[in-house]
Amino acid sequence: MSDDRVTPVLETRGCTVSYDLTHEALHPVDLSFEQGGTTALIGPSGCGKSTFLRCLNLMNREIPRCRVGGDILYHGENVNSTDVDTFELRKSIGMVFQQPTPFRKSIRENVLFAPKRHGVTDKAVLDELLETSLRRAAIWDEVKDKLSRSALALSGGQQQRLCIARTLAMRPDVVLLDEPCSALDPISTFSVEETIRDMAADGICVVIVTHNMEQAARVSDRTAFFYMGQMVECGPTERLFASPADSRLEDYLTGRFG
Amino acid sequence: MPKHRLERCGLTVTGACVALVTVLVVTLIVMVASHGLATFANDGIAVGDFLLGTTWNPHQADANGNPTVGALPMICGSFAVTILSTVIALPIAIGSAIFVVEVAPGFGRRVFQPLIELLVGIPSVVYGLIGLSVVVAWTRSWSGSTGYGILSASIVLAVMVLPTVTSLSIDALASVPHEYREGSYALGCTRWQTIWNVVLRSATPSLMTATILGMTRAFGESLAVQMVIGNSAQIPGSLLTPASTLTSVLTMGMGNEAMGTVYNDVLWSLALLLMAMSLVFILIIHLIGGRGAVRHG
Ligand SMILES: Nc1ncnc2c1ncn2[C@@H]1O[C@H](COP(=O)(O)OP(=O)(O)OP(=O)(O)O)[C@@H](O)[C@H]1O
Ligand SMILES: [Mg+2]
């Protein structure tokens, strides 16, 4: 299943999540994610895809009464412990949400938000970062003349690509995307997918939650199927879609539920 | 009753209510304006002398035989207490709003907000009494002055507007979508970086509205101010010397004068000035609100 030659960037061992301290929404999950690989997480609504994704950058820590169990290894080091600085960790693990969340600032300030907070002050470096990030997110041409305008004036698709640019400006080595295209038109979706493939080609480890099977097939090299809080099956995307081993995955793919 | 008649009945009743309110507001404005403008139209007092004159002594005639009614001391007093009380109240209001919304929401909802609502309902005379016995005495104890003045008035006003501004600030911060905070956390920002750069920034228009509403209240408050400001119609030389505001002069003077005298007309002019200022405050609120709405699309 996983390639033994590369060390995983991220790995979970027996990762569980309980909300409200009791309700176990995610049963133990073992998965590993490699550099330059793109993994799609699929499954019916409410099966725990977002919950699992939000473990990978410890975002669940921000939810009161939510408990994450098991080991989460980042470059071999367990980060699911209270003495790990989650804020420091999230500088290298970016996340993009379903709804774009541009801040009430200019486009420029949005993209440079993280680098500036994290101590980059050199103007030349920031300018370079601004342009490369926006270019990688395929939005540079649309906004290059209005960098000081409010980001809230952009369209939904542009806002989402801006959020991707904002994430890339941190130079992360992992990018987590939670249904990034579900609110986008086909053209924006196409360019986001293009960006995702570029990120993987640049060696970033990408994990994407999607409800769109074609999208999973287009961008990912590996797919994990979640069902009712469990990771049921994981394998190369083509193989998984062509000949699912688990009957629940087969039902899901043929549209019998979900 | 048949349906269409019921319909018409409803229309008539609600329409009459709207008409009544409209008539009331218009009458009010016309009345204050006509009395207030009589000072300049009938009594021969120049608008400039009124707005910029520094001596307030309506019972004494100046060289031209006009009463000396320079309102500048009161205008200064009003603005001084409004601004100073806002400067005192705003940081406390925003600070506690941050604590309540971002740090301890449970405590905020169960304990703090009911407490704040209690404070909103306290009548201003009570604030005045407390101001008189605590704030004035305290100021007197360390300053060597009488204790009456802009400073005492501002402190009392700050306490008075604090509940309103705080509860509006809480609403402002609470209405910032949770996704914005997560967006910032996802970029590796700490809680304080998130609060400072994202939450406060997104809530700025609402926070400004809260501030201006507080300022409107401070500007228009009369009773509590009158009790602690010392009521001396002079340009305030320091925060500790007795002064007066538009409202305090009005409440002090209104009962004493017969309708139609020059003094009485001048008091109406002060009222007109107050009304115009509140209008300006409200216009600002609308402008901010409108701009926020446009930005959010
Ligand atoms: N903040 C929360 N508090 C309590 N329960 C939650 C919370 N977030 C999610 N859950 C529960 O956890 C389970 C998994 O939710 P999750 O959001 O991970 O599903 P999902 O697979 O992402 O679904 P969707 O495709 O609809 O986004 C659901 O039963 C949900 O009710
Ligand atoms: Mg989800």
Image (cartoon, grey):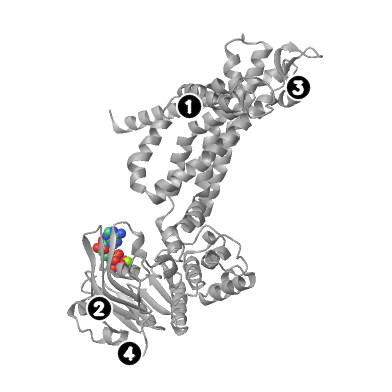
Question: Which residue appears farthest toward the left when viewing the image?
Answer: A247
Q: Report the amino acid beneath label 3.
A: Ala
Q: Report the amino acid beneath label 1.
A: Val
Query: For the residues carrying marks 2 and 4, which lies nearer the camera in this image?
Result: 4
Query: How far apart are the two marked residues, 2 and 4, measured between alpha carbons?
Result: 29 Å
Mark 2 — residue?
A253
Q: Could you tell me if residue B221 is visible in this image?
A: no
Mark 4 — residue?
A4
Residue B18 lies left or right of residue A45; in this view the side is: right
x, y percent for residue A118: 52, 66
Query: How far apart are the two marked residues, 2 and 3, measured between alpha carbons?
Result: 86 Å
Marks 3 and 4 in Cβ contact (< 8 Å):
no
Mark 3 — residue?
B46
- Give the numbered dot on residue B21: 1
Q: Can you say whether B60 is above or below A211 in the image?
A: above
Q: Chain of mark 4?
A: A
Q: Could you tell me if residue B104 is visible in this image?
A: yes
Q: Report the amino acid beneath label 4.
A: Asp
